[in-house]
Amino acid sequence: QQHSPAAIIDCTASEVPSALYETWLRQGISVISPNKKANSGPMSYYKAMREAQREAQTHFFYEANVGAGLPIITTLRDLLRTGDKFIQIEGIFSGTLSYIFNEFDGSAPFSAVVSKAKGLGYTEPDPRDDLSGMDVARKTVILAREIGMTIELADVPVRTLVPEALSDPEISSDDFLAKLADYDGELGAMCAEAAAAGEKLRYVGVIDAENKKCCVELRRYPKSHPFGGLEGSDNIITLQTKRYNKQQLVIQGPGAGADVTAAGVFADLLRLASFLGAPSAAMET
């Protein structure tokens, strides 16, 4: 008996529904999700989901895994499908850390900038969830796998911004912010050193496609670089490929927020409809 196409849209950040993706895909149910857990989880599960897709001829769309509504994953796929080869990908994948390091110019200590970001609603309720770098690491792994790398989350060295002494979850968020000032010295010195060279500190995910390695770390960029001139809380990514080598392809824009994330999910739903045979049409004017 032939059934109508079915799809599940998972807009949670939970591992519970993402653990069911393989089952749903095998049952003929397509999946759309901004949830990063499945695509950055164990490589064995990542491959099992793709195998389920092939066997059941279902679809799995997740543009909003990285950059919310920004066309990052579709761009990577288009480049690969048209014969391009990746050399390196660099990105500022956290709106929170983008804002913090755009504001951190040495005029105020790092802890004060983090407190300001929390007060403005840029951070998670516990800023350590942002400062740990794990969200950036997950997005880095997702993009690395998208271009064909076999890599586990645990393989990615992450430069955490949480002092080890303050990483204990028993320490409350308020106590963490109060004690963070005791550790301002190192980042303050790094900021001053970068400024003296006409550079800016940026927290980035890096994919070295040629050597099959990834990292998440603080890097310095001149103000003339797209990362160095960034403002606000935008995400930005540079794609260096054989085709876009001397002049890299740059994608920039809001990478967080309900409206742009919803747009990314809705675009995936429309993409699914087109794969299932919905007619294409020009936009009405």
Image (cartoon, rainbow, N blue to C red):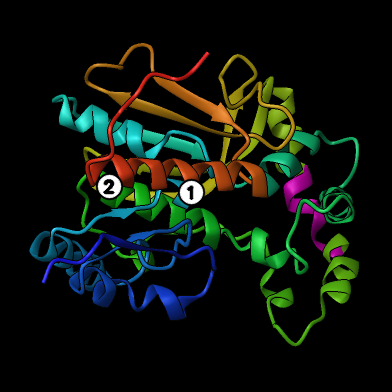
Q: Is residue 194 visible?
A: yes
Q: Quadrant of residue 108?
A: top right
State whether residue 233 is above or below residue 258.
Answer: above
- Which sits in the foreground, 17 or 109? 17
Residue 136 is inside the magenta segment: no
The residue under label 1 is which amino acid type?
Val
Q: Which residue is mark 1?
A: 265
- Which sits in the foreground, 27 or 255? 27
- Of label 1 and label 2, which has the lower sequence position? 2
Q: Which residue is mark 2?
A: 146
| Mark drawn on residue 17 | none
State whether residue 243 is above or below residue 124.
Answer: above
The quadrant of the image that shows the N terminus is bottom left
- Which sits in the foreground, 279 or 269? 279
The residue under label 2 is which amino acid type?
Glu
Residue at 39 percent of width and 41 percent of height = 270
Residue at 54 percent of width and 59 percent of height = 135
Residue 186 is inside the magenta segment: yes
The part of the chain drawn in magenta is 182-188
Residue at 32 percent of width and 45 percent of height = 273
Is disc 1 surrounded by few (<14), some (14 to 19) or many (20+) residues within 10 Å? many
Q: Which element carries disc 2, helix, strand or loop?
A: helix
Where is residue 99 shown, x and y percent of the image? 73, 40
